[in-house]
Image: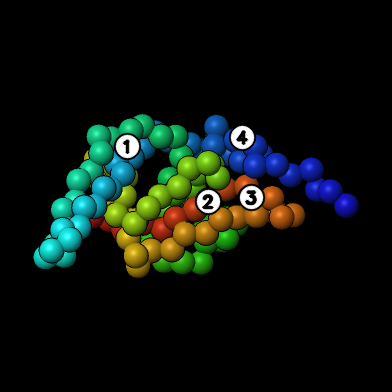
Amino acid sequence: MSLGITNNDFASVLSDLGVTISYKALSRVVDGVYGSATDTYAAGANKTWVFLKRNSKLDLTKWGIFDVGDAYVFMTTSDSLSVGDRLTVNSETYEYSQSNDSVGRFVGGTAVYNYYTLTLVV
């Protein structure tokens, strides 16, 4: 039995709840001799993703969120975050780090959206 679910089903959620986020990808170059790392962030690129802060009034469990983070971001399956990437929303910067979680959500074996927990950068 087919559920008729596609990864485009998230598009209506994105159009209803999506906000513009400035996304900065991290590039890390590690010195081959000393092992020190140099981090550089790309220029901010605007993305439309669903963004929720932990104190959001929305019931996060309906999204399948049981992880604790300062904020959460949901995006299409064609987008993703790498460790160290940063998002800026309303002048607050959040980072996806090794201590955060990421999950791809599937319905009937079809990838529908990705979500990540984020940490507020102070």
One can see residue 53 in this view: no
Eye-nearest disc, 1 or 3: 3
Amino acid, disc 4: Ser
User: Which residue is labeled 1 in the image?
Assistant: 22
Residue 11 pos. (x, y %): 60, 35
Q: Is residue 118 visible?
A: yes
Secondary structure state at the residue bearing disc 4: helix
Q: Amino acid at mark 3?
A: Ala
Q: Which residue is mark 4?
A: 12
Q: Which residue is mark 2?
A: 114
Q: Is residue 43 above or below residue 61?
A: above
Q: The disc labelled 2 sits on which kind of residue?
A: Asn
Whether 26 is drawn above or below 43: the answer is below
Left or right side of 53 for 107: right
Name the spot of residue 58 as percent of width and height, x first: 51, 52
Q: CA distance from mark 1 to mark 2?
A: 18 Å
The tag earlier along the polypeptide, 3 or 4, is 4
Does label 4 or label 2 sit earlier along the sequence?
Answer: 4
Nearest-to-viewer mark from 4 and 1: 1
Residue 13 lies, in percent from the top left, at 58, 39
Which residue is depicted at the point 79% across and 43% down? Answer: 4
Quickly name the residue at label 3.
111
Q: Residue at x 15, y 58 (%)?
A: 31
Please tell me how crowded label 2 is: few (under 14), some (14-19), or many (20+) other residues with Cα within 10 Å. Answer: some
Callout 3–callout 4 Cβ contact below 8 Å: no
